[in-house]
Amino acid sequence: MAQPRMPLERMSYDVLVVGAGLAGLTAALRLPASYRVAVLAKGTAADGATPYAQGGVSVALDAADSVDAHVADTLTAGAGISDPATARFIAEGAREAVEWLLDRGVPFSRTGPGNGTDNLHLHREGGHSHRRVVHTDDATGRAIAERLHAAARESDYIDLLEHRYAVDLITGARLGQRVNRCYGAYVFNTRTGRVELIQAPFVILASGGASMVYLYSTSPYAATGDGIAMAWRAGCRVANLEFNQFHPTCLYHSRERSFLISEAVRGEGAHLVLPDGTRFMHEFDERGELAPRDIVARAIDHEMKRHGIDCVYLDIRHKGEEFIREHFPTIRGRCLELGLDMTKEPLPVVPAAHYTCGGVVTDLMGRTDVPGLYAVGETAYSGLHGANRLASNSLLECLVLAAAAVRDITATPAPEPAGDLPPWDESRVTDSDEQVMVSHNWSELRRAMWNYVGIVRTDRRLERAARRTALLAGEIREYYSHFRVSGDLIELRNLVEVADLMVQCALRRRESRGLHYTLDFPEPDPAFAAPTVLVPTRPRPFSHLRGD
């Protein structure tokens, strides 16, 4: 028998930000102090993908560099389907974004004494024609995250709501209304086990990507595509979800499954080699180790399959111990903890799912198809990345488009209050006694996506994936409709939704381009030189307010 529903906690804010990474905190901190802002984090606000970012932020600062060159490199990496206007908008906003971080106290590495952007040390990474990546040694994301988290905690107008999972967006269409506007979200509090209602006239999805849909990933466990899935259910278009970036150099080690070896290591001269020490990248691309990530990842995958080996190796020993200690202290330190000394031996590496280049379709202000709903960062498809992401453009996109979304929100009059929104109804569900279904389907889904929708694809593999995701989606939907929600169930529901969208996008692209490589159509086709856009049907009203 269903237990009585506990009283629901209601909260009201001017802006609700879903996600406490760089995109979400940038938006929250750029909002005026006159706004009441809530920032949701699944764990603590210090969790998320931002601290994992080792590389840095792309910005044309060198005298030999330019915004035009940055735009050109971005469009080249995007393989013909990045939006030139978006690339220029973000490249032009890069200097101001870096200056904003400097004003927040982010300690970027320098070549000598200086203020502002003077004397910032610049890395060069794969796909870049110049040194243009500002960084804090090899732990840029962590340095940025620490400063922004501290600022958010010290603010008087931002509430960091930790240990909370967004379950579903509250929109007019889902409430049976004719106007499909966003009014807030239902949020699961893992500490109380209750679903809360957070009302806000503006909601910003900044919940990251969906790399955990794959068996092997460099992303934190929170990267389960929540924002993409919720926006799709709310009636937003999604695009380019067939383009999933696999980082070429994830450390291959039994005790560490998600530690990536930064792009900057190759940018500073590291060689990719086979177990016998033979280099191979120049057989695939004249740029060698500095080729874009999709080319490097496919080359490694090809060599591993051709030789029947478990990994290849990244060798930077020739640069010397002092150079390695100075430039890569974090990577060296973690490797030493695992018994590997990169100053004396090459590091074993393999590709792993790293970044979701597609997402919720937005304009240059971060606006989605649903009024009041914005998406920024890896959750969004702004047109910047196209068929592949240029290294270190991701943090930049978070910074520039979060600021743009804030400008739009502050220039938009708040709508009339939505009135008394209906509470989350658990009157027809019970506690689950079958948690094994969640864990089993989680594992099966990620393994199927890795095997069938991975670095190299075929129509047959994609069709198998479509059948598996459809079956799993049905089982998960039935389970969701009968049992109380949990964090794992919320993530699994979103993962299978995004997995299905990825497969749909991949089946529509009858060519190879950027990160989408299929043996059935191994060459690019000009007929497909455009984003893959999926359009949802009108959202169904909530069924007893559970979104199923």
Image: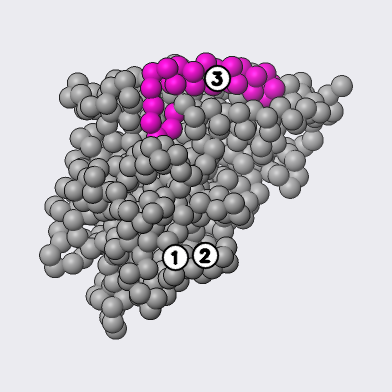
Q: Which residue is tagged 2? A: 340
Q: Please tell me whether mark 2 sits on a helix, a strand or a loop.
A: loop
Residue located farthest toward the right when viewing the structure as drawn: 1
View extreme (front): residue: 276
Please name the amino acid that badge 1 sits on. Glu
Q: Secondary structure at mark 1?
A: loop
Query: Which residue does the numbered mark 3 point to in the structure image?
Result: 468
Q: Earlier in the sequence, mark 3 or mark 1?
A: 1
Q: Residue at x 71, y 27 (%)?
A: 437
Depth check: 55 or 63 in front?
55
Estimate the x, y position of residue 253 in percent, counting from the top left.
55, 53
Q: Position of residue 93 (x, y in %)?
A: 25, 55
In this view, the residue in front, 495 or 375, is 495
Q: Is residue 479 magenta?
A: yes
Instruction: Residue 133: give x, y in percent of width and height.
Output: 29, 62
Q: Residue at x 33, y 36 (%)?
A: 515
Q: Which residues are magenta?
A: 453-481
Task: Say whether marks 1 and 2 touch (CB < 8 Å).
Answer: yes
The numbered mark at residue 345 is 1
Label 3 and label 1: CA atoms lie apart by 42 Å
Is 427 inside the magenta-drawn segment?
A: no
Mark seen at residue 480: none
The relative height of residue 478 versus residue 433 in the rendered view (above or below) is above
The location of residue 313, given as percent across then percent down, is 41, 54
